[in-house]
């Protein structure tokens, strides 16, 4: 084995690591070139990274015809009330006050069969207040993370008649912080 081969082998195994003994790699023979690292691939040529769908914007327009008040209190992991209703097609405002000891959020889903998947995905969604971007296609309304003592408002049009589930997606809260939203004829 040549000295240059030994250097390359050492670099491959050790990755250029150093130790307290400061021995370093053996010296390369003069005139022997080591291969250059691969050039970075420009972003335009890189494989596109599939982005999750964006969360729908939750704007308060001030045109709501009704307001529903939700809250949480103290150490209890629950929404109060845990059942609310509104008329189908109405524009409503939900005002959520976090009087609890922990941060919470609010997510109202169009369909129940995706909730377990979204609860799991929420663990990886700290950057979006534990509302997974992939939940966007399934949400009627949602809030950012609401700190204790904070109040947040969400405005939306009540979906077709039926029952819809709202939960807190903060990790560990979804099993207890759950409620039913009824859309009435």
Image (tube, helix red, strand yellow):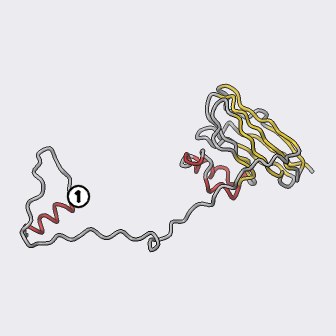
SS at badge 1: loop
Residue at the right extreme, as displayed = 185
Name the residue nearer the viewer: 42 or 168. 42
Name the residue nearer the viewer: 153 or 17. 153
Q: Position of residue 159 (x, y in %)?
A: 83, 54
Q: Is residue 122 above or below residue 34?
A: above
Q: In this view, does 151 lie above or below 162?
A: above
Find residue 84 and report its image quarter.
Answer: top right
Residue at 59% over, 48% down: 128
Residue at 75% over, 54% down: 110
Find residue 72 and report its image quarter.
Answer: top right
Residue at 61% over, 55% down: 133
Q: Position of residue 18 (x, y in %)?
A: 18, 50
Q: Which residue is tagged 1?
A: 15
Q: Quadrant of the N terminus?
A: bottom left
Q: Position of residue 147 (x, y in %)?
A: 63, 34
Residue at 8% over, 61% down: 27
Q: In this view, does 172 lie to the left or right of 88?
A: left
Q: Is residue 65 left or right of residue 73?
A: right
Q: Where is residue 68 in the image (x, y as percent from the top left)?
A: 82, 39
């Amino acid at each position: 084995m040549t000295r240059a081969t030994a250097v390359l082998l050492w670099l491959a195994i050790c990755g250029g690591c150093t130790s307290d003994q400061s021995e370093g790699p053996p010296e390369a023979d003069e005139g022997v070139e080591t291969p250059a690292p691969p050039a970075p691939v420009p972003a335009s040529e890189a494989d596109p990274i599939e982005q999750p769908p964006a969360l729908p914007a939750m704007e308060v327009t001030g045109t709501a015809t009704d307001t529903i008040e939700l809250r949480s209190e103290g150490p209890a992991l629950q929404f109060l009330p845990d059942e609310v209703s509104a008329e189908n097609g109405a524009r409503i405002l939900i005002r959520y006050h976090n009087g609890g000891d922990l941060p919470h959020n609010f997510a109202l889903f169009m369909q129940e069969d995706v909730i377990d998947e979204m609860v799991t995905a929420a663990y990886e969604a700290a950057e979006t207040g534990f509302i997974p971007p992939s939940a966007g296609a399934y949400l009627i309304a949602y809030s950012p993370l609401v700190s204790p003592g904070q109040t947040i408002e969400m405005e939306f049009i009540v979906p077709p008649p039926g029952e819809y589930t709202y939960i807190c997606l903060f990790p560990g809260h979804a099993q207890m912080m759950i409620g039913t939203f009824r859309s009435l004829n």
